[in-house]
Image: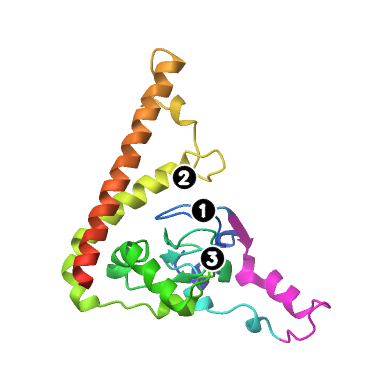
Amino acid sequence: FTNLEDAKNSGLKWFPYNKGGEFRKWRGNDEYVVNWENDGAEIKHWLVNNPKDPKTTHWSRRIINTEFYFRQGLTWSFVSSSTFAMRYTPEGYLFDVGGSSMFPDESEIYPMLAYMCSPLAFNFIKAVNPTLNFQTGNVASLPWPVDSLRPLFPELTASVETLVNISGSDWDSLETSWNFTAFPFLTSSQIDDSLEASCESLRKSQSHDVEQTKYVEEEVNKKLVSAFG
């Protein structure tokens, strides 16, 4: 789904929900769903009939920016115990402040993600907010010299596609992932003559992913540092 109307007409009840989570780059932290059946009718009803909060006279005082629901974009955790990073979100998700979100033009989504996961963005954010609460205003204040960066968009997009795919596959290897199908060492690509050999094959595959991620991230950061001067 890409908009409220499509979601409402689907007749479905539960929808993916970005609510932050632990520090993670590129992709993942898909852990929550929310009841948005019939355009969130039950939630809206609860908001205006909750005796503990009589000040809420209309649901729109609590549910905001609904025009961005279900769009593809980027999300990050409002509170972090380490550094700043963003993740790609495909179409079909809702969000709140815990999983704060932004929605660049489609051609800028992956280049923007490259920038937001770089040390540059983190250092800029620390300059305006030294806490570990990464507010939307802090992110909105970051420089984005789009004209200078546009020539890099094809390279950055290709690199980030690789990083998103690796991170997404890593997330889906967890038993708690919605897309989990089998333990990695039991998949056809990893099965060997013995459990020991299968585990060793998996270890090598994961080590390769780690090294590739490290290499691609470093190349992306070099390009961005050069572009920013």
Task: Indicate yes or no whether the magenta region holds residue 56.
Answer: yes
Q: Residue furthest left?
A: 151
Of marks 2 and 1, which one's residue comes earlier in the chain?
Answer: 1
Per the image, the residue denoted by label 2 is 171
Distance from disc 2 to disc 1, alpha carbons, whole Å, reads 8 Å
Q: Nearer the viewer, residue 222 or 74?
A: 222
Q: Which mark is residue 29?
A: 1
Distance from disc 1 to disc 3, alpha carbons, whole Å, reads 10 Å
Per the image, the residue denoted by label 3 is 99
Within 10 angstroms of label 2, few (less than 14), some, or many (20 or more) residues? Answer: many
Q: Which residues are magenta?
A: 32-57
Q: Is residue 46 above or below residue 83?
A: below
Do we see residue 103 in this rendering? no
Residue in the picture at 55% in, 38% down? 175
Q: Amino acid at mark 2?
A: Trp
Quadrant assignment for the C terminus = bottom left
Q: Do callouts 2 and 1 mark residues in contact (Cβ within 8 Å)?
A: yes
Distance from disc 3 to disc 2, alpha carbons, whole Å, reads 17 Å
Place residue 205 in its image quadrant. Answer: top left
Q: Is residue 41 left or right of residue 222?
A: right
Residue 134 locus on image (x, y percent): 50, 71
Q: Do callouts 1 and 3 mark residues in contact (Cβ within 8 Å)?
A: yes
Residue 225 locus on image (x, y percent): 23, 66
Residue in the picture at 57% in, 71% down? 97
Q: Amino acid at mark 1?
A: Asn
